[in-house]
Amino acid sequence: MRSPVVAAVAAGVLATPGLASATALSAFHTPGWAAECYVPFPHELPLSKTGITCLTPSDGFTISMGPFGRPTKTYDKNAVGYRDPFAARRLLRLGQHWAVRPYWACSSKATGLTCWNKSGHGWWLGRFRGYRVF
């Protein structure tokens, strides 16, 4: 019998203590809902054709990227105050990591949320203000 970690890695989703796992719609929020992120897993597209999107409900800042490209960003007035407690019910606590291997990973720290893709591009979102794209 394989361990849950081995089964999760074989499925392409890493799930270990301190690491949140992916679901049909993999989504999470950070403490205080400073950020909310999601990766939709549509049935008709391979995972490599989707992307990760994070938004900051405080101001509607929205940033997205695919598994290989650079992020794109915008401000969406409809995202101001938006929280989806059903899809993003998972809390990514400070010090936790989340990943959909090998495409995306995120790390939540006291200074903010950092997410990156397979190419090493990504972003840092400050807890309640500021961002950096890399």
Image: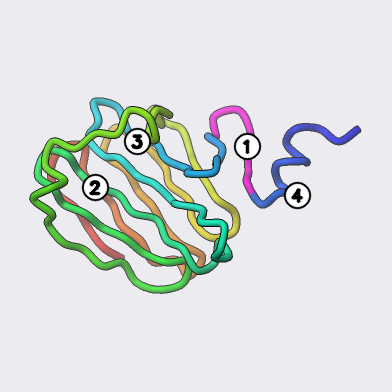
C-alpha distance separating marks 3 and 1: 19 Å
Residue occupying the point 55% across, 50% down: 100
Q: Secondary structure at mark 3?
A: strand
Are the residues flagged by discs 1 and 4 in contact, CB closer than 8 Å?
Answer: no
- Reading the chain from its start, which is encountered first: label 4 or label 3? 4
Q: Which residue is mark 3?
A: 109
Q: Residue furthest front?
A: 44
Q: Secondary structure at mark 2?
A: strand
* Residue type at tag 2: Leu
Q: Residues within 10 Å of mark 3 (few under 14, many from 20)?
A: some
Q: Which residue is mark 1?
A: 15
C-alpha distance separating marks 1 and 4: 11 Å
Q: Which residue is mark 2?
A: 55
**Looking at the image, is mark 4 or mark 3 nearer the viewer?**
4
- Reading the chain from its start, which is encountered first: label 2 or label 1? 1
Residue 20 horizontal/vertical position (percent): 53, 34
C-alpha distance separating marks 4 and 3: 28 Å
* Residue type at tag 1: Ala
79 and 19: which is toward the camera: 79
Residue 60 horizontal/vertical position (percent): 13, 48
C-alpha distance separating marks 3 and 2: 17 Å
Image check: 54 left or right of 50?
Answer: left
Q: Is residue 15 magenta?
A: yes
